[in-house]
Amino acid sequence: MHVERLKYVIWAADFERAIRFWCDTFGGRLLKRNPVIAEVEIAGAVIGIHSGGEGKRTWTGINLQVADVVDAAHEVVAAGGALAREPEPEDDQPPHLAMCVDPEGNEFMLTRRRERPVTAT
């Protein structure tokens, strides 16, 4: 099977607000838009934003890797999002994870590249 394209679709109760959040906060590029769905490209990946959402909190599985999790978490909040889990230092390292929520209730992660290798247990 040849997959032509992969995108992850999230729901939005406020379609316009969701498009602005994902484009403005993460430097997304609006690829397509009609009254039902918009497609936003971020770092080569496509997020589809579907109108008609109920605004309920939903885990998405989206993970955005950033250079500084603390700074990025502040930007998420400034853009109207929220933090479900604040970034915290771990093993004397700077924070590498923040659990976030967009204004539509879609949960996602911010992570940074770890400076040390992670070993499997």
Image (cartoon, grey):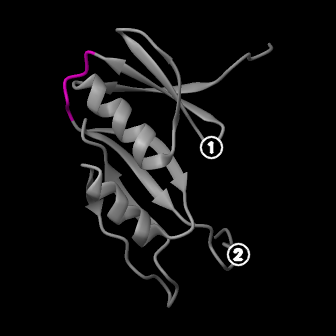
Question: Quadrant where the N terminus lies?
Answer: top right
Res. 117 mark: 2
Q: Residue furthest top?
A: 35
Q: Which residue is mark 1?
A: 43
Q: Residue at x 37, y 30 (%)?
A: 19
The kind of residue on which mark 2 rests is Pro
Depth check, front residue: 107 or 1: 107
Residues shaded magenta: 52-56
Q: Residue at x 64, y 70 (%)?
A: 121
Task: Please tell me whether residue 38 is drawn above or below residue 61 in the rendered image.
Answer: above
Q: Is residue 60 in view from this perspective? A: no
The percent position of residue 101, horizontal first and vertical second, equals 30, 48
Q: Is residue 55 in view from this perspective? A: yes
Res. 4 mark: none
Mark nearer the N terminus (2 vs 1): 1
Label 2 residue SS:
loop
Q: CA distance from mark 2 to mark 1?
A: 24 Å
Q: Residue at x 50, y 91 (%)?
A: 92
